[in-house]
Image: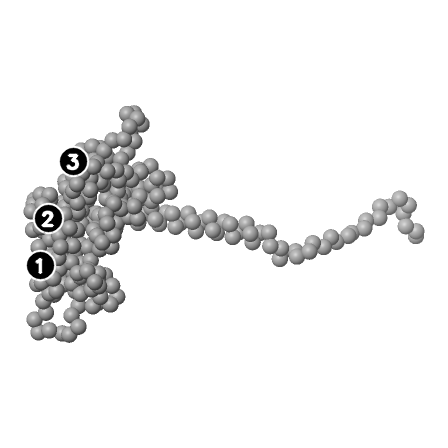
């Protein structure tokens, strides 16, 4: 029998796609998704492992709202009349107001700590280089730590003694004046470098404690109220700041303006 007349003829053509399932477009989208998820979980981890003050500091870093205002008041003190108090703008008042006025108990705010750190050791610090090079600051959960350390050519105390050098006396005048406007308590810690030989009666504990107590005495004889000193501790050579335990910069005093 012949083929039926008018029957449809079906032609199947296979369209080949270059690359097939090996194409790279989906990989780009997947990589974007994984990156976004990684960023999300990193952000969640940071939020859970940081304090409210730390998160506020991070936010201010990316969107600064508290300008540091080291303006001179024309004084002749250790800070030469420089105020280390951060200035905030009150939208309702339209002018700068002292941030400490916002703290009911008169304690330093986070902005005050940052401003004080900049005043003492920042690039725009008004202090002379001979003083500023001895100072390092950092803000922790405990408060603002001001570290005063020896330099190879400029010690802060007489060798193996608790007698401060003139440069140390000047530094303590600066710190006392900077801490005076606040009501926060202060902690004092003394550290010393390791001795090159093992001694039968090492002076580390006695020396570090004695130097810390000398700092307490000098500060309270100045502008710091005695009742604000919460603790005075000697750490000997147990917590060096430098890898070389005999580095003279391990001879240091840490003053903490506590939160």
Left or right side of 93 for 217:
left
Residue 33 in picture, x, y percent from top left: 50, 49
Task: State the residue position of label 2.
Answer: 219
Q: Who comes first in sequence, dot 1 or dot 3?
A: 3
Label 1 with label 3: CB-CB less than 8 Å: no
Q: Kindly state the secondary structure of the residue where label 1 is placed.
A: loop
The residue under the point 17% across, 65% down is 193
Residue situated in front as seen by the camera: 234 or 216 = 216
Q: Does residue 197 appear to the left or right of 3 in the view shown? A: left
Give the spatial CA distance, label 1 vs label 2. Answer: 14 Å
Identify which residue, 9 or 57, lies in the foreground.
57
Question: Which of the two discs, 1 and 3, sits closer to the camera?
Answer: 1
* Circle number at residue 163: 1
Which residue position is annotated with label 3?
Answer: 105
Mark 1 Cα-neighbour bin, 10 Å: few <14, some 14–19, many ≥20 = some
237 over 220 or under it: above or below: below
Q: Nearer the viewer, residue 74 or 204?
A: 74
Q: Report which quarter residue 207 is drawn in.
A: bottom left
Q: Is residue 211 left or right of residue 132?
A: left
The crowding category of the residue bearing disc 3, from other C-alpha atoms within 10 Å (few below 14, some 14 to 19, many at least 20), is: few
Q: Seen in the image, is 49 located left or right of residue 143?
A: right
Q: Is residue 17 visible?
A: yes
Q: Is residue 110 visible?
A: no
Q: CA distance from mark 1 to mark 3?
A: 36 Å
| Residue 67 against residue 2 in the figure, above or below | above
């Amino acid at each position: 029998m012949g083929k039926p007349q008018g029957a449809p003829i079906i032609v199947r053509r296979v369209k080949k796609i270059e690359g097939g399932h090996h194409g790279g477009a989906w990989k780009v989208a997947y990589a974007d998704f994984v990156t976004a998820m990684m960023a999300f979980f990193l952000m969640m981890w940071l939020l859970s492992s940081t304090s409210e003050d730390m998160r506020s500091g991070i936010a201010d870093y990316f969107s600064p709202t508290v300008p540091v205002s080291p303006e001179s008041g024309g004084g002749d003190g250790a800070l030469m009349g420089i105020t280390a108090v951060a200035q905030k703008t009150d939208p309702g008042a339209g002018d700068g107001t002292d941030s400490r006025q916002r703290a009911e108990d008169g304690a330093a705010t986070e902005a005050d700590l940052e401003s004080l750190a900049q005043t003492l050791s920042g690039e725009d610090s008004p202090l002379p280089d001979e003083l500023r090079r001895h100072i390092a600051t950092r803000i922790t959960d405990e408060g603002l730590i001001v570290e005063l350390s020896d330099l190879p050519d400029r010690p802060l105390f007489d060798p193996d003694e608790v007698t401060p050098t003139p440069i140390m006396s000047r530094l303590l005048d600066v710190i006392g004046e900077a801490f005076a406007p606040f009501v926060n308590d202060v902690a004092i810690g003394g550290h010393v470098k390791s001795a090159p030989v093992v001694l039968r009666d090492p002076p580390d504990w006695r020396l570090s404690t004695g130097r810390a107590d000398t700092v307490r005495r000098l500060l309270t004889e100045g502008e710091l109220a005695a009742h604000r000193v919460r603790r005075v501790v000697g750490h000997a050579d147990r917590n060096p700041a430098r890898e070389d335990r005999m580095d003279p910069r391990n001879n240091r005093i840490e003053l903490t303006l506590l939160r």
